[in-house]
Amino acid sequence: MSRRVRRKVEKKGKEQLLLPNYSELITDDNDDDLVHSFIPTSPNSISSIPINPINDSIDWTTLPDDTVIQLFSLLNYRDRASLASSCKTWRNLGSTPCLWESLDLRAHRCDAAMAASLSSRCFNLRRLRFLGAEFGDALIYLKAKNLRELAGDYWRNMTDATLSVIAARHEMLESIQLGPDFCERITSDAIRAVAICCPRLRRLVLSGVREIDADALNALAKNCVNLCEIGFLDCLKVDETALGGMSSIRFLSVAGTSNLKWGLVSHLWSKLPNLVGLDVSRTDIGPTAISRMLLSCKSMRVLCALNCTNVEEDANFVMSCNGSKDKLVLSLFSDICKGVGSLFADNSMEGRNVFLDWRDTKSKEKKLYEIMIWLEWVLSYSLLRIAESNPSGLDNFWVSQGATLLLSLMQSSQEDVQERSATGLATFVVIDDENTSIDGQRAEAVMRGGGVQLLLKLASSWREGLQAESAKAIANLSVNPNVAKAVADEGGITILAKLARSMNRLVAEEAAGGLWNLSVGEEHKGAIAEAGGVKALVDLIFKWSTGGDGVLERAAGALANLAADDNCSMEVALAGGVHALVMLARNCKFEGVQEQAARALANLAAHGDSNNNNSAVGQEAGALEALVQLTHSPHEGVRQEAAGALWNLSFDDRNREAIAAAGGVEALVALAQSCANASPGLQERAAGALWGLSVSEANSIAIGREGGVAPLISLACSEAEDVHETAAGALWNLAFNPGNALRIVEEGGVPALVHLCSSSVSKMARFMAALALAYMFDGRIDEVTLVGTSSDGMSKCISLDGARRMALKHIEAFVLTFSDPQAFATAAASSAPTALAQVTEAARIQEAGHLRCSGAEIGRFVAMLRNSSSILKACAAFALLQFTIPGGRHALHHANLLQNAGAPRVLRAAAAAATAPLEAKIFARIVLRNLEHHLVEISI
């Protein structure tokens, strides 16, 4: 489609009067009279508009009527209604009959009351498109007795009774098109009613009818003598004999229709005297039937056999069929553009863009024009159906010519061809819908063919159906990073942000999907915010809060991606995103929406050190309660994202207590107990949320009391590294409490922690497992050991002693893995900073700098430096080294706590102790040096 911008400039003295740009109406060749009726009748009508001398502005109220009518014709229905509300004169002009010859109500819910309100303007209505069987019952209230063309999408629930009434009320109908959804409830009875009531019928296209019998076809042949085009698509059964008796047919498509007797078909249909084009795509027709049709049917020019397995298995047959100049067979393994070009006598249309070249020619021979229009329609339909089924073995076709064909068909003069081709582009690149995976080669083929620029141009059209399908294609293609970059470079982000503000829900939904996919790239997040995309997405949630899951899931998903960026997360909060997302988490029942809303809240809460969103989410009414409730969802993705959000929120002290008050401890313990066989992502977040809550001693005790120890031990045995870390962190916090420490021993936690400490590939998991074991056996567990009978007490002591020996052995082994004997010997013999720095670098666990300890925990490690166990002394010194290394996120915090706890004196004693192990001495000296560094930093 080629849309031009008419830019009018009229001289006025030495100045130029520049009017705004208006896109010209897109029409086909049959709309010439309609277009011409909108052009101003007077060549001076624009120049005669008065100019306000004060500010050189145009007095729009004095525009000639025909100019205003032309402006109306270029607007969608909502904008047209807004313009008509400006004044009484324009309201009357907005009702001009020529503006109401065509109506597209697919984006609107149209019941009987709405149809009745439109009826006064529909007397001259010629063309009508609508969506859904529900509108069929309301159609009669439009009182459009002069209706010529009727196109209905998604008629699955349409009944015979409704279709019969529609036909009876609109006897002037010339074209009926119902699909692409299957008309499963329509039978031959309704087709007979159409034949009797609509004698002027010229075109009939039905999809998915179960059976079309001889009586229905005979009625069409008898009553509709002008019926020249029939499409029985994806039907289960069609009477071949009766169809062969319809002599008026010029174009026939039975694409996807099954149970056809091809021997009978080739014998009877080849006798149709006017048959020019036959489409048998996606059927089981064989070479023999095609050969017979080509030889016997003198009038036939084109036979489409796309994705016919029996034919395409014999490539030589297809090539031999195209040897004749007056017959053309199209298949997926033939050069379709070259073949179509051969229809032209002068060989001027044999390029790759034969349809584009044909449209640009000034003279169009009528018969060839009809063939090309029909070919555009059947090709777009079959390509879309083939893309939807995604059969194997077509990669080469899609890359070499499929993408080019779809891009060419997108520029058709037929609106439904354009939209279907855009949908085909959106569909054929997707190879795994579940994981949003697309074929890179196909996406690149679209980009090479100028598809990005074309799609963005069509997305800027005033036609909402084309906006929606183009935005869908842009969204799917943008999964490919190269295409996403091209979309952004061509201004696509601004276009999508604008479409996301559309009052048409389908348009807004697809635009939100495009922003969702583009927001995956870090380089696009800022551009989306600058284009107003964040505000548009938040507004979508409020606007369509009850409008269905599609638009809400896409908007929430895009916001979730954007919230992962620090700057964009603040934009989301400023735009009211926290309230919008919490509203979805609380009220929406769609699992996809719940998952994305929870993920967005998790990402908003992940920037606790740089903005206030963490506390803002926690303080939003009902937020924590909603997230806790979502952990009970039957959908794993929802549970995972809800647990992740609670984990991030638990870093704020107030949130931590509020989560517990909302039942978070019980919910998360139950989640941990149920996710033994779940995905590593859910396991990690369940353990992580318990880790975050267990920072509070009261919560730690509650987790132990609720049975949280056993599932965490089980998760510590997971094969996933990330799960190791969160489970070990949670057990470390729990082990701070002696009662929980005993529970860990009794539940078999020591072997699990020992295994982590010695075998995990994660240094952090090994580190925290060692600290948990150190907490458990630094002597405090003995205070809560319950002694029953003397024999029970002896047995328990023996059990604890064995566990203690096992734990201390592996703690020592862990610490020694960070000990380089030569570096330690050098550090022991020299007080030079470089020697200590070398030991520090070898011992450093990078991620440990993110851990934040409380004063009680730091005090516990200081007390451990006085423990009689040399192993625990070395472990405590090693831990304090990790917590105080300069550059760590919380190193200064820990240094202050150590100063307050009087640690320097204890550290000096440990460093000088004759009986202390060398590791404890060196690590203690390094911690002292770190404290001195932080003391200087504070003083500066």
Image: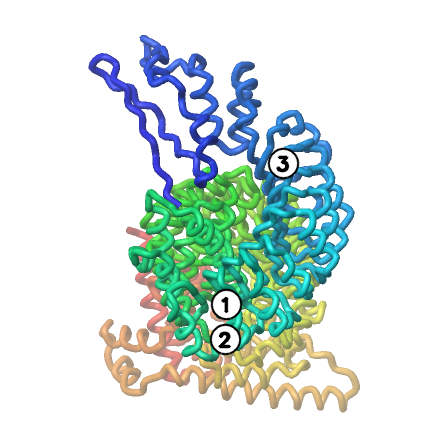
Looking at the image, which is closer to me, 91 or 869? 91
Q: Alpha carbon of mark 2 to alpha carbon of mark 3: how far?
A: 41 Å
Above or below, comparing residue 187 to residue 43 in the picture: below
Evaluate whether residue 436 shows in this view.
no
Query: Mark 3 is on which residue type?
Result: Leu
**How many tags in the picture?**
3
Q: Residues within 10 Å of mark 2 (few under 14, many from 20)?
A: many
**Mark closer to the chain start, 1 or 2:** 1
Where does label 2 land, which residue?
Answer: 311
List x then y, in percent, for residue 606.
49, 55
Label annotation for residue 147? 3
Q: Alpha carbon of mark 1 to alpha carbon of mark 2: how far?
A: 8 Å
- Contact (CB < 8 A) between labels 1 and 2? yes
Q: Secondary structure at mark 3?
A: loop
List x then y, in percent, for residue 20.
36, 26
For the point 41% across and 25% down, the residue is 39
List x then y, in percent, for residue 526.
37, 48
For the point 63% across and 47% down, the residue is 225
929 sits left or right of 373 in the view: left
Q: Quadrant of the N terminus?
A: top left
Query: Mark 1 is on which residue type?
Result: Ala
Where does label 1 land, which residue?
Answer: 305
Query: Mark 2 is on which residue type?
Result: Val
